[in-house]
Amino acid sequence: MAMVTARQVIDATPLRKNLDTAYIDTIIVPTQLGVLRDIMCPEMYDYAIANSWMVDGVTASGLDSVAATLMTDYVAPFLHWQCANEALPYVRTSVANNGLFSGLPTQTQSASAPQANALADEIQSTASMYRRLLSAYLEDNKDEAVFELYSSNCGCKTDNSIFKTFKLII
């Protein structure tokens, strides 16, 4: 089950005209499973999916306010930018085929390699920022009842976790 839609990913990032929804649809769930699940802790992620905390960018009604904030203000933006980051190889292929353009819609030209690299760096940097914000929000709110699976039953915060790797906990 996808937490966000391909259209939301495309609309939220500067890749708007260089991505198609069919391609993004193929990377949303793998990004959730391969990246977001590790950040949220597998037990909490699985619980959020099983209880439909967010489906297609819509947060479930009746969610605790802390969980609703997590999903709308942290998880959704993280997924938008991380999916865009995962799409960069596709965009780079499009760049090679004159698929990335710069300039105004009435006066476009193929983007140069430095312009394409700058865009890739911006997307990677923004995805990394949202990763840090999401992880910090989870840590800051780990004592909330709705995050019980994150704070007490999760084995991902061991010494080998992403939290230690990115120095998000001591």
Image: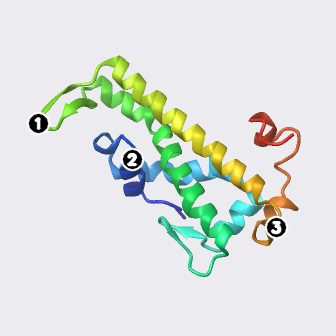
What residue sits 77% from the left and 61% below the top? 43
What label sits on residue 95 in the rendered view?
none
What residue sits 79% from the left and 67% below the top? 144
Question: Can I make out residue 87 in this image?
Answer: yes
> For residue 1, what is the image quadrant?
bottom right
Q: In the displayed structure, would residue 107 be above or below residue 80?
A: above
Distance between mark 3 and mark 1 Cα atoms: 53 Å
Tell me which numbered mark, 3 or 2, is placed earlier along the sequence. 2
Q: Are marks 2 and 1 in contact (CB under 8 Å)?
A: no
91 or 139: which is nearer to us?
Answer: 139
Residue on which disc 2 sits? 23
119 or 37: which is nearer to us?
Answer: 119
What residue sits 84% from the left and 38% below the top? 160
What label sits on residue 148 in the rendered view?
3
Distance between mark 2 and mark 1 Cα atoms: 27 Å
19 or 78: which is nearer to us?
Answer: 78
Q: Looking at this view, name the residue that lies furthest to the bottom.
A: 62
> For residue 112, what is the image quadrant?
top left
**Left or right: where does residue 153 sit relative to residue 77?**
right
- On the image, the x and y values in percent for residue 13 come to 40, 45
Q: Quadrant of the C terminus?
A: top right
Residue type (three-letter) at the residue carrying disc 1: Thr
- On the image, the x and y values in percent for residue 44 come to 74, 62
Q: In the displayed structure, would residue 68 be above or below residue 97?
A: below
* SS at badge 3: helix
Q: Looking at this view, name the residue that lies furthest to the left.
A: 106
Q: In the displayed structure, would residue 22 be above or below residue 150?
A: above
Residue neighbourhood size for the residue with mark 3, other residues' Cα within 10 Å, grouped as few (<14), some (14–19), many (≥20): some
Residue neighbourhood size for the residue with mark 1, other residues' Cα within 10 Å, grouped as few (<14), some (14–19), many (≥20): few
Residue on which disc 1 sits? 106
Residue neighbourhood size for the residue with mark 2, other residues' Cα within 10 Å, grouped as few (<14), some (14–19), many (≥20): few
**Left or right: where does residue 11 sit relative to residue 154?**
left
